Image: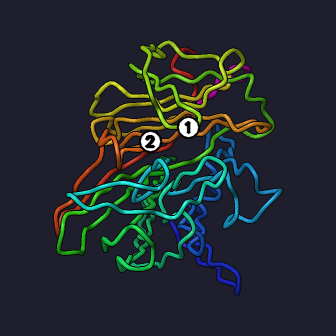
Amino acid sequence: MIIEINASKEEEIVSLINPWTQERAEINLSVGATLIKLQLLLDKKLESIIYMPGEEKSTLKENGLHPSAILAPWVNRVRNGNYSFLGRNYQLPINEKVLGNAIHGFLARKPFVLSARESNDDYCEVTLQFKYDGQSWEGFPFPFVFNVIYRLYSTSKLEVTFQAINTGTEPMPFACGWHPYFSFPNTSIQDYQVTFAAKEKFLSDSQMIPFKTESVNYKNGVYLSSEKLDNVFLLEKIPYHIAELKELKKQQSIFIGHSSEIFPYFVAFIPEGYDCLAMEPMTANTDAFNTLEGLLSLDPQEVFNGKIDIWLGKSVDS
């Protein structure tokens, strides 16, 4: 297992590669440590499963669909960019102008640095780091260090670990999520079914902030030809939850595994005009900085850790 680094004036790309199978994960360090490509083996064939909607219209740094973005230190939206924490009020920049919210935290487009690397016959991994000084983002005066660890296994699995450390002297509000889009090449989203252990679906108001819930059961799957998803869901608490995105014609699946005790919220989202589905594990709900739904309070030097796995396989039903 090997690691390659390619740097230019514009960007730095790190690649994790299995030289025996040519499986690889490519990450853009310069723009949010973003996973821009993932090729895994299925039935002795390499499949590229990370979809980057919007790349034909804008650069990764300006892409409003936030493909593969790391969502931290908040997930999705903060209504009007305003929140209170421990008796103090804060105002974040409004970076979703149309709806008037602060959206997706601020790590998605920050430059990360390579802080550690390791490779052997079983896996290769890189630790990518961003240090926040507590001063350079209006409305968030809480310093922290954020690490994302990408590990590609020789067993055809990618493991992504998110780690945050409160380096300040006061408690810090925190939430974490991930925003990857998935599909197999040259397929229609109409030919997919997604399965995950949701128990509630959140319905949103005109600012895309949840205001009520309805009970759902997607354990037997939902056909994307009949339901257009753009919701936050509350998952059943399972030590290892598995979401399956199944392409029905070839009966092949993309699997996302994580603890729904750590990531109890889950977004499923089909962007308009694209054949892909965002599957987004999150520690907290939209607007958690105000509703407190899933919001973490990290004490000084406290560490958050959350892990997400990705692999391919034939459908469990086939």
**Mark 1: amino acid:** Met
Write the residue at 29% across / 47% down. Answer: 295
Residue denoted by label 1: 208
Write the residue at 41% across / 22% down. Answer: 197
Which is in the foreground here, disc 2 or disc 1? Answer: 1
Q: Which residues are magenta?
A: 248-253
**Mark 2: amino acid:** Thr
Please identify the quadrant where the C terminus is shown.
top right
Please tell me whether residue 27 is drawn above or below residue 318 in the rendered image. Answer: below
Q: Mark 2 to mark 1: distance in Å?
A: 9 Å
**Of marks 2 and 1, which one's residue comes earlier in the chain?**
1
State if disc 1 and disc 2 touch (CB < 8 Å): yes
Q: Which mark is residue 286?
A: 2
Write the residue at 67% across / 38% down. Answer: 183
**Magenta stretch containing residue 249, yes or no?**
yes
The secondary structure type at the circle numbered 1 is: loop
Furthest-bottom residue in this view: 9
